[in-house]
Image (spheres, helix red, strand yellow):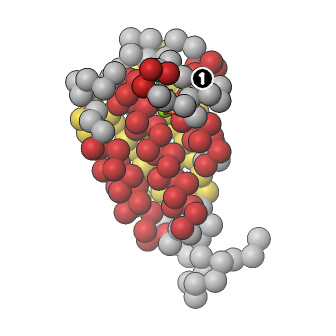
Amino acid sequence: MENQRNVCEIDFLAVSENEALARMVVAAMLMPLNPTVDELADIKTAVSEAVTNAIIHGYNQNAVGMVHMRCELDGKLVTIVVSDHGVGIENIEQAMEPLYTSKPELERSGMGFSFMEAFMETLSVESAPGKGTVVKMTKQICLPEPDGQVPEE
Ligand SMILES: Nc1ncnc2c1ncn2[C@@H]1O[C@H](COP(=O)(O)OP(=O)(O)OP(=O)(O)O)[C@@H](O)[C@H]1O
Ligand SMILES: [Mg+2]
């Protein structure tokens, strides 16, 4: 199969309705690659977590800023970048610890980054207080053979 490449970038207002929008954009982009149900669910969950964080933490649910999402397909490799220009993260290492949340009053469980880490293959977070946050995730998906068979490694 030829090396499929595609890129999509969107900006959307930081409102919770747009979590579904972001998930659907990524899912639609992945369709030509015939991802498995699990692969699709994993990537959609990771996207949801990153976008929710931008909305809830980056912009404190004030619907004041824009979230940017870039999705790139390069053959089997899916790269998703979610960024905001919100409050940023003071201590990235602490923020990425399982169960750490700065908003326990909102009943957040502090598992967003852990899910992104578990469901994707790589996760990197860059952030600066007062400037914003960039979350980059990648995952290789297993392309089926043209006859629908999953290739043996
Ligand atoms: N885009 C962001 N801007 C500012 N702070 C962020 C951002 N993303 C994450 N954080 C910080 O990192 C912490 C951990 O994020 P994580 O997604 O793991 O947990 P959570 O969002 O608090 O809870 P959950 O995702 O389980 O609902 C957040 O509580 C917040 O302090
Ligand atoms: Mg979260």
In this rendering, the count of numbered labels is 1
**In this rendering, position of residue 14 left or right of residue 113:** left
The residue located at (48%, 66%) in the rendering is: 4
Q: Quadrant of the C terminus?
A: bottom right
Question: Quarter-wise, where is residue 95 in the image?
Answer: top right
Is any atom of residue 134 visible in this view? no
For badge 1, the amino acid type reads Tyr
Specify whether 72 is left or right of 59. Answer: right
Q: Where 7 sits versus 40, above or below?
A: above
What is the crowding at mark 1: few (fewer than 14 residues within 10 Å), some, or many (at least 20)? some
Q: Out of 44 and 29, give the one closest to the viewer.
A: 44
The quadrant in which residue 42 appears is bottom right
Q: Residue lying at the far bottom in this picture: please name it.
A: 147
Q: Quadrant of residue 125?
A: top right
* Of the pair 97 and 78, the residue shown nearer to us: 97
- Cβ(mark 1) to ligand 1 < 8 Å? yes
- Residue under the point 45% across and 63% down: 30
Disc 1, SS: loop
Q: Which residue is at 40% across, 36% downward?
A: 52
How far from the left and from the top, in percent, is residue 45? 50, 49
Which residue is tagged 1? 100
Q: Quadrant of the N terminus?
A: bottom right
For the point 39% across and 44% down, the residue is: 70
In this view of the protein, can residue 147 be seen by the observer? yes
Q: Where residue 9 appears, x then y in whole percent?
A: 33, 46
- Percent of width and height locating residue 33: 49, 69
